[in-house]
Amino acid sequence: MDQILLQSPLLTPTPIWLIALPLLVAFLSPLWGRARWPLLFGVHLGLFALALWLLAGVQDGPLIETLVIAPPLGIHLHADAVSLLLVALLTFAVALVAAFLWQGARAPHWQSRQAFVLIMLLSAGCNGMLLTGDLFNLYVFIEIAGVSAYLLSALRRDAAALEAGLKYLIIGAVSAVFILFATVLTYITTGTLNLAAIGMAFADIPAAMQILIGLLLLVGLGIKAELFPFNVWVPEIYRGSDPEASALFSGVVVKAFLFVLFNLVFLILADPAVVGRWLMILGGVTMVIAELTALRQRDLRRMLAYSSLGQVGLITLALGFAETTVVAGGLFHLVNHTLAKLLLFMVAALMLSRASSGHLDALTGIARRLPLAAGLFVLGSLSMLGLPPLAGFMSKLWIMAGFAEAGVFWPIALILLGALLEAAYFFRWIALFYRPVPAPRLASDPVGLPTASSAVTWPLLVLAVLLIGFGLAPVLLEPALNLAAEVLLDRSGAIEAVMGVRP
Amino acid sequence: MRLFLRVLSLMVVVTPAVTWFAWDGALVWPLFGGATLSFDVTPLASFFLLLLAMGAPLAALPMLRKEEPDWQLALFALLVLGMQGLLLAQDLVGFFIGWEIMTWSSWLLIVRSPRTDAGTAASYILFNLSAAFLLLAGLLGVYSLTGSFAIQALVDLTLAQGLVLVLLFGAAFLIKIGTLPLHLWIPRSYDQAPEPVTVVLSALVSKMGVYGLLLMLILFPEMPGRWFGDWLNGPLSGYGLAWIGVITSIVATFKAIAQDDMKRLLAYSSIGQLGYVTTAIGVGGALGISGALYHALVHTLVSLLLFISFAGIIAQTGQRRFNDLGELIYRMPISFFGVLIGIIALAGMPPLPGFASKFLIFVALIEAQWILLFAAVILSSAAAFLYCYKLIYAPFLGQANSPEARVAREAPWPYLIPQIILMGMLVGLGMFPGMGTALADPVLAALGLAPLDGPSLGTLATPYGGYDGVTLMLVFGIAFALVTALFYMLRGQLRRAGSRQDLSFAGEVPTPDQPLHYGAGMGRELRRIPLIGWILARSSSGFFSGLAERVERLAEHSSRLYPSQPWRWVQSFVVVFAVLLTWGLVRGGGL
């Protein structure tokens, strides 16, 4: 395994730019004036390209970028095939949300400079979480992403949004306490904060301490990664926030936390099988309970929140199995869920701008007014449910085929049950959208709103094309996903790349 | 744009015909993990592709009317693509992809109709998706056993493996066919779907379940013989299936007689006819499979014809209940002949091909010596005459019972053209009944059965006798011509009633609002017949709605797990953390 150590010359494309550039642009925000949204879009498109370029370079081994002193003493970034894949996904997702806001958001709170800065910080924090090789830095990035997320959810500044923001702040603080405790205890017992070094030393610390640290991390990260029973806060927050913000939470932030959770599990534990099995059970429970609860929801945003929980459960179920095929399928599903959820939340944003509320009754018959948006909602839901020929089907099939190959059938039964429950509520919503309504309900649209045919839909169409494209040709992503799964599961390779010795 | 979409959709709709005539060479499409999707035409697929190739363009014609919305044709094109995909698929994943495209595109067709209520939309999608997920579970089971998704004979299964797979696949296809007690989604969705869509659902979509059931004979070649041995002269494993089919057809037939709504009656009739097909597949053997295929072919033509004819009546009158129609024979003569030919074929009367297909099924049952089943099939086909009678009498004869029925005009050409073509096809097939078995013979060969090999297309030949279709058709044709000629010659001398109200019975004179035909209230008395009344009063809908209610209640309980106060969240985290920590420490050992 050839190890690349770069001395971070300022103007070469290195992973640090994935974190530094959003921070820099955010701090210089007074300079940008009216060009904020194009800039947000452009920067993330650039970061997306950079991530892809770097991804092409880490096929043979991770890229270790030392920031201060060489690891294990100093701080470094650990860019490998899986973290860069996720960085590429998340920057792409942020770019699409930025494009949507640029073209569509007319509300004053989205026009403000705060929104721009917060999204930039959120993106920097998430990229940092994915790339860092240091436990304390991880905590710092979690806080950066967290604080910007709280503020984003309160951005609208009406009662509902402020309540959501405050609740998010409370729950985020609780999560941070758990993670910080785990960090401190790890430092006390192992004497290092470098993740690879912790990975080598973790097996030697007392068993009780291992369990304590493990549980602290599980609760702390489980809250943010939306695993049951730590996800009870999610519907409230998503309900109160704008759908654009929820798209970022569900499509970007949660995915970063899922990666962090599983990266720690696979890096620190010599034998992740036992913990993996527990995580699988946790994922299965998360999925079934969330899908069941979603049946009763009467608010579009709450319904999407529960569906998001269900999908996170499914991804956890797949990643917890710790077997290359299933993990590759799980990563594929993670990608598809981000794409489909972005699509659904942005469609929800369009619909909420027309309807009086997100309630079932207010949205009945909305397809008459927003035919394209309703059609895209159908497409997104079909992918979410895992119906062919869309991407969500291919990833679910991939996961289930992996389970079938291994001869493990209970996850398959759970996944199919979850999908059936999911179908019950998604199809009920679709049926409502297409219900014919009496004429008086079809009042003319308020002036000044973007029409569904305007430029605001092109980010949605890009997502739709991707969902269809990956559904028809999953081979496009297959090499990247397989490599990412191997790298994620390859503990000794990751440790060797940093420490120079195999564990 | 609109025109472009229409032309494109129409082109897609005729693709099954193009594929059927001009397919050569297989198509392979890469999936992940080295798996591929491959498409090709097998003999079995070719038979059902022919049904699709005939049915799709005919069903598309009524959708071309200006009154029908744009999206209908486009979604129908998607549905046709899905069905074609599942027929051509050489592997289970391709089959499943086609199956699911068929499921959701047909659901979207139904749900956009103004008449569809939430319960129908939900039952359609939930039954069909349950079928699909059972299928998915089955195909994953096959994958775990063989390591491949290919549709191939699975040999050397243990009994347990075989039974699980057969149950998964079988349940999936029986839901689609709509056998009892899994038929609930059919009557309401056929009833509430837009009229042109119901044609497609009954004639084409339901046949895909039949295709799947026949596919199981390829997947599990050892099933008929080795697993359980024989019962009399037929396979014991098929005996249960045959009974499921017969019970379905009996119950559906009686339910059909009791219906007041034309499309609901046809929906139940459709369930009943597919019950015969299921029975025939259960009997198996050359005669049984041939009878199943033949009956599937006839039912496709008949349900196209009947549903299109009634779609025309509904479009012209706006009425869908028998009691609101009547006397349309003068106003819609072509539709009258359409329905007449349709019910003759549906009832299985000679000389039309419904007789030929039922003949094959009867002979197969006799060959297997399953006499009780044979008697049950006879019972249900005899009872089917009653609803066939209602279908022709209530709309066309008697007196017109609504203002719309009094002024209706003949259906427009988009309805009449397919009717005329289908009448021609049915008469032609009745004249040359050997054509059906000739089409089925390649399938029999592919399944490893001896083809029937009729001597000519004009005769239907079985080892137990047959008949000459040309002669039969000539006899009936001449008799029909003679009677009609006699009627027209004598017409002048018959006394015509001044009005159809000009009669009295039991000292009473009917008022104009009293429906004056024998079809009115027909089936009401059936409830007084002991066993049949019991059947008609029962329904499995209670079970399924109870299940739905339970799930809803469960969902209500689970939503309590998500409180809205932050202190409850933190409290629950701390409790969970403490419990897990205690448990972990007591258990001892590290991670």
Image (cartoon, helix red, strand yellow):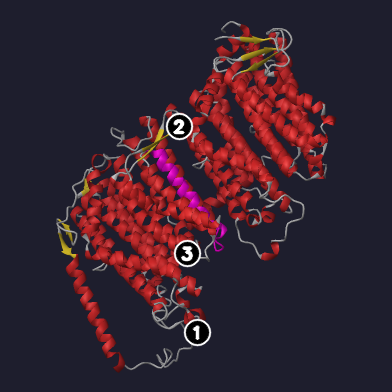
Amino acid type, label 3 = Glu
- Secondary structure state at the residue bearing disc 2: helix
Magenta stretch: give its range: B91-120
Marked residue chain, label 2: A
- Secondary structure state at the residue bearing disc 1: loop
Q: Nearer the viewer, residue B92 or B239?
A: B92
Please identify, in this view, whether the residue under mark 3 or under mark 1 is nearer the observer: 3
Q: Which residue is mark 3?
A: B195
Q: Count neighbours of disc 2 (C-alpha within 10 A) and say few if under 14, some if 14 to 19, many if 20 or more.
A: many
- Secondary structure state at the residue bearing disc 3: helix
Instruction: Please provide percent x and percent y for residue B392.
Output: 37, 74
Q: Which mark is residue B143?
A: none
Can the viewer see residue A255 in this picture?
yes
Horizontal side of B564 relative to B111 (left or right) equals: right
Amino acid type, label 2 = Ala
Q: Which residue is mark 2?
A: A401
Marked residue chain, label 3: B
Instruction: Please provide percent x and percent y for residue A18.
Output: 70, 23
Q: Is residue A37 above or below residue A51?
A: below
Q: Which mark is residue B513?
A: 1
Please identify, in this view, whether the residue under mark 2 or under mark 1 is nearer the observer: 2
Amino acid type, label 1 = Asp
Write the residue at 56% across / 9% down: A2
Report the predominant secondary structure element of the magenta stretch. helix
Q: Count neighbours of disc 1 (C-alpha within 10 A) and say few if under 14, some if 14 to 19, many if 20 or more.
A: few
Horizontal side of A261 relative to B368 (left or right) equals: right
